[in-house]
Amino acid sequence: MSSSGILALFIVCFCTSGRLWATATQMWPDLMKKSREGGLDAIETYVFWNAHEPAARRQYDFSGNLDLVRFLKAIQDEGLYAVLRIGPYVCAEWNYGGFPVWLHNMPGIQMRTDNDVFKNEMQNFTTLIDDMVKRENLFASQGGPVILAQIENEYGNVMSSYGEEGKAYMNWCTMEFHGSCASRMMLQNQWSELVSISTCNGWYCDQYQPRRSNIPKMWTENWTGWYKNWGGKDPHRTAEDLAFAVARFYQLGGTFQNYYMQLHDLLHSMEDILTTGNVSFVDLGDDSVGGTIYSNEGGSSCFLANVDQGSDKTINFQGINYTVPAWSVSILPDCQNVSYNTAKVSTQTSVMVKKANVAEDEPISLKWSWRPEMDDKTILLGKGDVTINQILDQKEAANDLSDYLFYMTSVNLKKDDPVWSYNMTLRVKSSGQILHAFVNGELIDPVVVDLLGMGKGLAWVNGNNIGRYWPSFIAEGDCNLEPCDYRGSYDSSKCLSNCGHPTQRWYHVPRSFLNDTGDNTLVLFEEFGGNPSSVNFQTIAIGSACISAEENRKIELSCQGRPISAVKFASFGNPQGSCGSFVKGYCEGSKDALSVVEKACVGQESCTIDVSEDTFGSTTCGDDVIKTLSVEAIC
């Protein structure tokens, strides 16, 4: 690594995001191990200011799963790099973007701009993190895993609204923190790059270019899908589209990309030529197709891309015809043979099943007790602790100590009022979810929005918060039941599912939260009713494992530590369908594919199969058919 740290970034690096507080500390080593085995190089994590300095200024919490140093050392122990996104504004679909609410309530403060009160607090927290990591020798310049640190996040999206003060703030961020953190500092904006690295966030970053040629092209958030919202449908992004986006990024000069969660191995094998080779672009006579050649003294590697959303293209490249499917990239490490095409992802699909907890068959297994809230004064009498003639900001009124703030108001009508009658209707228009209404001091039926089943609230297992629940909020609208087409640009409205079902029903309970002996206590804070008698614990395991792969590849099937008990389907030729609904095509290998796969896999925790005519026998498919093996195994 050079003294500036630049050379360390001109590598092919794959990264994934992990939030240390979102998992139990006991899970960290296994998660790091699986990340490395999955072909990743680095773990990227936010540092949440409101988690580490939550309730009061200068009162810190780095205990338990907030132990940042322990998290970074777990990354180091597995031989991975770390990317530290200090913020302190992180966005991340997190409360107040990671800012503690006490910060909002400081006199004279203005957030994320050239404001001395804010900058002083920001500098105090970021320096605290910097010193903490430095004391443990965790920065790359000290031999540690942290190769990059990021200050601020996605400021380029909002900087224009701050005007000149926004530019001054960015300049302060750049100059103040340069050299104090990791080998190099990232800023997710395009304005200041004098001593920092701008980066890209999005579904596609192939067209993004840094403003200077001597800094790496970095993709800090590769959105593998989209986040869910209460009452919303489940978003899904296909593996083929994700692979297309990654391949295009590296085809056009990318060096680092982070999944925000066969291709990794291939690109890693081409690392030297991708980072040191000369780049040339080939005009293939069609605006929707393009070739890229990387070459150095050791040879050449090529990419062929087809960005047409509907049509496959046959390309004549260096005297050889190649068929590139729509919306895909073919990678030719030697510029002659296609080793990978993003439309032909051949990774295993695991179908997870939930199994009932046998212990709960006993009638007395779960005992429930109710503890009502002492709320007669507020709910029954409509009296609050504060009277004010304006709407309060919840951040100021609750100071982040509670998610709940009830607003109460009253309207007094005399009998001689013109609107008075004995059949009046009270109508309230509100964006809230709960309304308690009183007439002459008596509670009338509550008005709620889309509330069915359990209701809404928070859950704890043995004192550990497992999250908010709202299974009564049903995802509305129509979902397309046809298989999702990977072709064409992805956005948050594409490939939606789960219509007519709760946004979230199942909640992960880490094993470390449970007591091996004695009782386990589940506490539900329920806001407006619900029946807990249907609550139960279940375990999750792989029910079946599926894979499809073209000829001349090796595939691996695995039941993740459990033996493969049977093979439900296997066909080599041109099988059709998807996992759970495979059917044979019109041509097959001369050997019984089911018997071949059973012999190789049944009784094994994992098995490797060579997809070839040597294994499955010759076929009568014809030269125009790409021979494929499809398998569904039962775990």
Image: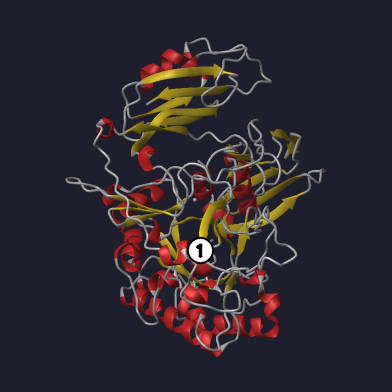
Q: Residue at x 38, y 61 (%)?
A: 21
What is the x, y in percent for residue 265? Answer: 48, 45
Q: Residue at x 31, y 31 (%)?
A: 562
Residue type, mark 1 in image? Trp
Residue nearest the viewer, comparing 52 with 546:
52
Say which residue label 1 marks: 94
Based on the displayed image, in which of its 4 quarters is residue 609 positioned?
top left
Q: Considering only vertical position in the picture, is 142 above or below 374?
A: below
What is the x, y in percent for residue 410? Answer: 59, 68
Asked if one can make out residue 3 in the rendered structure from this viewpoint, the answer is no
Dot 1 crowding, Cα within 10 Å, few <14, some 14–19, many 20+? few
Residue nearest the viewer, comparing 276 with 103:
103
Q: Considering only vertical position in the picture, is 502 above or below 197?
A: above
The quarter of the rendered structure image containing the N terminus is bottom left
What is the x, y in percent for residue 631? Answer: 48, 23
Based on the displayed image, in which of its 4 quarters is residue 599 positioned?
top left
Asked if one can make out residue 33 in the rendered structure from this viewpoint, the answer is yes
The quarter of the rendered structure image containing the C terminus is top left
For residue 214, side relative to residue 45 (left or right):
right
Of all residues, the one furthest to the front in this rendering is 416
- Total numbered labels placed on residues in the image: 1
Residue nearest the viewer, comparing 314 with 110:
110
Of all residues, the one furthest to the left in this rendering is 517
What is the x, y in percent for residue 286? Answer: 81, 43
Q: Residue at x 62, y 59 (%)?
A: 431
Q: Residue at x 63, y 48 (%)?
A: 245
Disc 1 secondary structure class = loop
